[in-house]
Image (cartoon, helix red, strand yellow):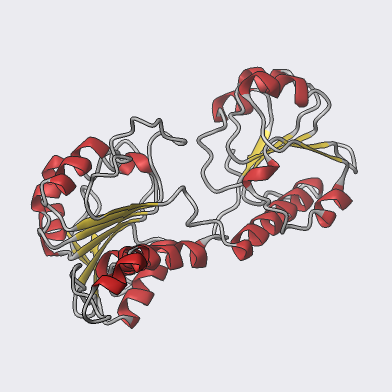
Amino acid sequence: MSDSPSIVFLDRDTLDAGDIDFTVLESIGPVSYHALTHPDERAGRVGDAEVILSNKVVIDGSVMDAAPKLKLIQVVATGINNVDLAAARERGIAVCNVSGYSTPSVTQHVFALLLNLASHVDTYASEAPRWAESPIFTRLDHPITEISGRVLGIAGLGAIGKSVARVAEAFGMRVIGLAREGSEPGTGSDGYERLPRERFFAEADVVSLHCPLTEETKHLINRETLSLMKSSAFLINTGRGDLVCEPDLAEALRNGQIAGAGLDVLSPEPPPASHPLLDPEIPNLLVTPHTAWASVEARRRLLEGVIENLRAFLAGERLNRVD
């Protein structure tokens, strides 16, 4: 690869809201920016690229073949499901990602969702026109519950899961983890108890999902696991949409099987208007459009990680290489 490689950023708008400075990226090599890229536009935009940057645009073998100079695919995210790794390997193209940049932002979002569910802040605030109808300013229409003293069950005690656990403890919650299939339940080196599936879902007052999406974790939340949860329990998902069987969750919320859910991810994204969890009649459901990771600080850290990877690659070093 040349000392000043040609870089193509296929979906800059997934990272930038006019608050990101790309000067340092441009010092590495000439950059062609595209706000978003439709599948039909990919091949025409990567022809001279030595480096492709992509957050969500799918990079498959046909795109790689359209870029004969391509040496590196830099995913502007942690998840790499938008890249055909086998095709990249066959063509000798490196693939890198960035991890760890969003931990504080996601942790904050988890509790934004949880506290709204527990305190109905969003509900009460949206009913301001009705306040004058009440003989007192304080209203008790929507129940407020305290999370102090409750049990937070975390599926996936990695970096983000542990960050969420620490904040939960500051709120006075007790933290338990979900034991992996085939592993022995018990207390891990981090001090958190791992419980088998049935006990985990039965004991948790809040279940928060932070595990990767794999064949084993797909639809971890389903009719069976929802039936194990308390009727007063909340579900939080800032991981991946397919961790949840969404029709089962919609049914559980309608039936009052659990008390509420806060979701930042759906499957697919963007969702169709007919998506089962976009029905406004579903009670106690909060859905945000995959923004848990998107604080300005996290997005700046993400760009810094991309730049570090590019510099390492140019220096012949392996940094955050996933293939």
Between residues 13 and 79, which one lies in front from this camera angle?
A: 13
Residue 217: x percent and y percent? 29, 43
Indicate the position of residue 61 as horizontal and vertical percent values.
62, 20
Q: From the viewer's perspective, tell me whether residue 238 is left or right of residue 84.
A: left
Badge count: 0
Residue at 27% in and 80% down: 137
Residue 85 visible in image: yes
Q: Quadrant of the C terminus?
A: top right
Above or below, comparing residue 37 to residue 204 in the picture = above
Kindly identify the residue that appears in the image at 60 percent across and 52 percent down. Answer: 98
Of residues 79 and 316, the one drawn nearer to the viewer in this rendering: 79
Q: In which quarter of the image is residue 4?
A: top right
The percent coordinates of residue 208 (x first, y second) are 30, 59
Q: In this view, does 188 lie to the left or right of 198?
A: right
Tell me where residue 284 appears, x and y as whole percent. 24, 55
User: Please, is residue 56 above or below residue 16 in the view?
Assistant: above
Which residue is rendered at x = 40% and y = 51% of the image? 264
Q: Residue at 35% of width from left, 66% of height from top?
A: 129
Q: Is there any visible trace of residue 222 in the rendered image?
A: no
Q: In which quarter of the image is the N terminus?
A: top right
Q: Nearer the viewer, residue 220 or 308?
A: 220
Q: Is residue 297 left or right of residue 201?
A: right
**What is the quadrant of residue 113 in the picture?**
bottom left
Toward which corner of the image does residue 42 lie, by quadrant?
A: top right
